[in-house]
Image (cartoon, grey):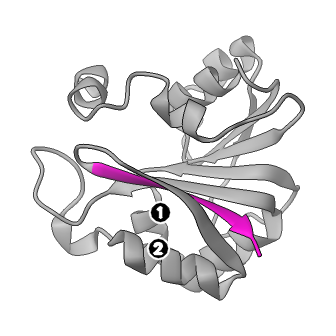
Amino acid sequence: MVDKIREMSGLTDNRIVDFLDLKKGYSVIDIGGRDGFFSKKMLDKTDNVTVLDLNDLYFDDLKKAGIKTIKADICDYSEGSFDLVFMSNVYHDLVNECASKALKNINKIAKRYIAILDFKPEETIFGPPVSIRLSKETVIENMKQIGLKVIKEMELKWHYLLLFERE
């Protein structure tokens, strides 16, 4: 079912990872990375990928693929330093659960870039309630508060993707 949803929403090809312009040697943390769908694709570009998730259900498979794992909640986690912090369909939850703590922790672990892929605030056939979705303008304003500027944007069928860099 998850694969079908990804296919329907246009997330199955390499556009997302290509958009990130990863370089060999970059360190990446995929917050809320679950099964490592994007993390596994990132391994083609860099060999230093970590998934941070509350649920360790997929950790054995991720480790076999060469992906590091951390069982933690970004609302409480602020260790390490990564060239890119990547979040797919999780930022809206973080803002609704622990906004200031999440922003502070994300800012602390992000060396240079933050990428946020999230649902547009409109009705779709799946995804979180529209009431908790964030406009890309809201996300841009949040990142501006921690010293980041948007440098690239991509519009997808039901999502937007924003890449931020430290100012």
Q: Is residue 146 left or right of residue 89?
A: right
For the residues labelled 2 and 1, say whether their Cβ atoms are less than 8 Å apart.
Answer: yes
Give the vertical position of 164 relative to 69 (above or below).
Answer: below
Number of marks present in the image shown: 2
Nearest the camera: 142 or 95?
142
Amino acid carrying mark 1 in the image:
Tyr
Q: Point out which mark residue 139 bears.
A: 2
The part of the image, by quadrant, that contains residue 5 is: top left
| Residue 159 point in image, percent of width and height | 31, 50
State the image coordinates of residue 161 (x, y, percent, origin top left): 45, 52
Q: Nearer the viewer, residue 76 or 17?
A: 17
Task: Provide the secondary structure element on which disc 2 rests.
Answer: helix
Answer few, some or many: residues within 10 Å of disc 1's Cα (few below 14, many 20 plus, some between 14 and 19): many
Q: Is residue 167 left or right of residue 79?
A: left
Residue indicated by mark 1: 91
Residue displayed at 59% across by 22% down: 41
* Residue located at (67% from left, 53% from top): 72
